[in-house]
Amino acid sequence: MGFTITPQELKNRLDKGEKIFLLDVREPWEHSLAKINGSVLIPLGTIPQSLNQLDREAEIVAYCHHGMRSGDAAGFLLQQGFKNVKNLVGGIDAWSLQVDPTVPRYR
């Protein structure tokens, strides 16, 4: 699928200083346990009323725990006319395993 990005691809691009808007669509309790630095929390259920907080021109990478909710969020944003939205494959769990082991894993 064209609208996914792997944890390693994301890390490489962030390391290069590329401007990517990291959208965390999990719940606040999850965000408080573990997050990717620089991400913005907008829980999945609140995205429809939060569209004005998002830049339609920005590249947005959505993530959740394992990639299911953020896949829904990415699909929704694309339907709303956002052009450059990707889903982080495997979510923050894969990020912790593959990129940054300091990010806590949770169930």
Image: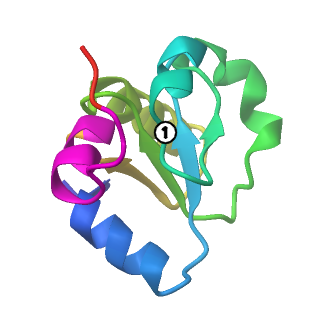
> Can see residue 89?
no
Q: Quadrant of the C terminus?
A: top left
**Residue 105 position within the rendered picture, expressed as x and y whole percent measured from the top left:** 27, 30
Q: Which residue is mark 1?
A: 35
Residue 51, placed above or below residue 21: above
**Residue 39 position within the rendered picture, expressed as x and y whole percent measured from the top left:** 59, 47
Q: Is residue 91 left or right of residue 36?
A: left
Magenta stretch, residue numbers: 91-104
> Can see residue 1?
yes
Residue 58, placed above or below residue 44: below
At horizontal 47% and vertical 74% (from top left) the residue drawn is 14
At horizontal 36% and vertical 23% (from top left) the residue drawn is 69
Q: Which of the two residues, 33 or 44, is positioned nearer the viewer here?
A: 33
Q: Is residue 56 left or right of residue 19?
A: right
Residue type (three-letter) at the residue carrying disc 1:
Lys
Q: Residue furthest bottom?
A: 16
**Residue 63 position within the rendered picture, expressed as x and y whole percent measured from the top left:** 41, 39
Check the image and tell me how it is coloured. Answer: rainbow
Q: Residue furthest right?
A: 52
- Magenta run includes residue 43: no
Residue 30, placed above or below residue 90: above
**Residue 8 position within the rendered picture, expressed as x and y whole percent measured from the top left:** 23, 67
